[in-house]
Image (cartoon, rainbow, N blue to C red):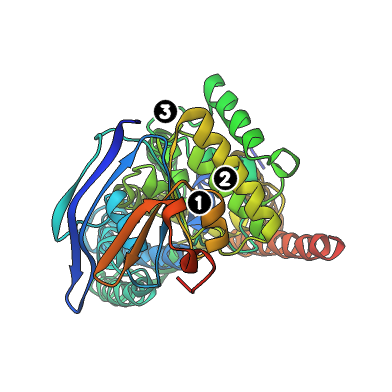
Amino acid sequence: MFELEFMRNAYVAGTLIAILSGVMGVFVIARNMSFLSHTLSEIGFAGASFGIFMGWSPLNGMLLFTTISSILVGELSSQVESRRESVISAISGLFIGLGILFLALAQTNSSYATNILFGSVIGISQQNVNQMILLSSLVLVVILLIFRDLKADSFDPIGARVNKVHSSLMSILFLVMLAFSVSVAAQIVGSLLIFILLTLPAASSKYFAHTVFKMTGLAIVFALTGVWLGLYLGYLTNWPVTFFISTIEVIIYAIALFYNSLRNRSE
Amino acid sequence: MQSSLIKIENLSLSFPDHHVLNNLSLDIKKGEFLAVIGENGVGKTTLVRILLKQLRPSSGKIIMPDDLRIGYVPQFRNIDVDYPLSVRDFVSLSFTGFKFPWLSKTEKKRLNEVISEVKLNNIEKRPLGLASGGEKQKAYLASALVKHPQLLILDESTASWDPKTKHELLDVVVDINKKFSVTILFVSHDLKLVSEYPDHYLWLQKGNYESGKISDLPRDVKEGINV
């Protein structure tokens, strides 16, 4: 398997994405942003088709669209928390519409669109891998720098305010980093299912681990399990990798919920 | 006589349809244990939010040191049964700032101190979501104490405690108040506790207020006319 260059690239890229999603996912879950990360992945698709239309690389189009839309969501919903879901729906509707428009205008064949939506292991070149290393390192460094305040703001917003954490700065920085992560990860699992890696491993980890560090570690392990095993099963069967990755993550989540209900019953 | 920590001068706050605080002046001394009482809607929480600089008064001012360290135990926090962090990790969230993600030796030492001060040692590893109401309140108190506050604000925080927890917690608070001269602002409806623990009171009423030593608090108030 590893004699094939694209499989080697896929494993390197997949590993990066798993680490990134594990780290980001813990905050996505704590901040209740599953829906936003789903939406950002759809917007990533729109951005990619815009990129193709403009003759750029799809990644640049994705970065542009996801960054703008996440800042919009942050700004429009920062005052009224309960407005967030509707704002996200509106923005995602607008961007998906644009995505379909640009795809039609770009006149590329539809396989390009399905590649963006569902991911493509074969499509990952060495250059893609380099871009991904660069972007994921950027995201991880930023998260490391703001780690304490982001943690406080995500897990205890009321206490964070008393401790003078700059909540809106944390929110915008996090949203932009989330946009970057979605764009990076969309290339391998596809924009449609990136939210799986950004939510389920972290959502599962919180039933087994009770510190932010341990949750992050475990979320990375769960994400890596899905990605590595999914790539291998995809290689064996020739079925879509995304199918395997999402199924594995859903199974892990189901086990976590089951474990939790058993534990609660025994207490 | 202790020196003054916070001076409130002619403080008023009105919302478009009503006044909540009207010309309030008060001197809060260092090391004072002040009870803030009054009916719902007279401005107890509003006063707290002005002290925390989350609200601006319509007129008047509060004079206090710019770098005053405030610990705050709020009325309500959004912790549901799925909340994952352990009591210990939750308390450690108070170590904020642009520093290494992990705690330094001094910070770990402080964390241990606070956890034993508030008597959380036996449940420090338990997920906060699964802790009882009283245990949660202890964790909130610990988290407010982490940064050595000079002013500790307890906002209605006894509401959900059982009588045993109330006394346990307030004993800790009194201890901190005496040992480190931490000023306490205790917003409460529980008049029994108010006559037992604090040394001064501020009784907010609609458009008016009274303040003084707890021993001067009118007897009918102490005996539980619903304040």
Amino acid at circle 1: Phe
Residue at the spot x=29%, y=35% of the render? B4
Subunit that carries the residue with mark 1: A
- Callout 2–callout 1 Cβ contact below 8 Å: yes
Q: Is residue A130 above or below residue A63?
A: above
Q: In the rendering, which numbered label is found on residue A155?
A: 1
- Is label 2 on the same chain as label 1? no
Q: Residues within 10 Å of mark 2 (few under 14, many from 20)?
A: many
- Is label 3 on the same chain as label 1? no
Q: Is residue A84 above or below residue B109?
A: below
Subunit that carries the residue with mark 3: B
Q: Nearer the viewer, residue B180 or B68?
A: B180
- Callout 3–callout 1 Cβ contact below 8 Å: no
**Rendered location of residue A193, percent (x, y):** 52, 64
Q: Nearer the viewer, residue B154 or B222?
A: B222
Image quadrant in which you'd find residue A65: bottom left
Image quadrant in which you'd find residue B22: bottom left
Locate residue A93 relative to residue A16 in the image: left or right: left
**Rendered location of residue A201, percent (x, y):** 62, 54
Residue located beneath label 3 in the image: B99
Residue located beneath label 2 in the image: B90
**Viewer-nearest of labels 2 and 1?**
2
Is residue A25 visible to us here? Answer: yes
Residue at the spot x=47%, y=67% of the render? B221
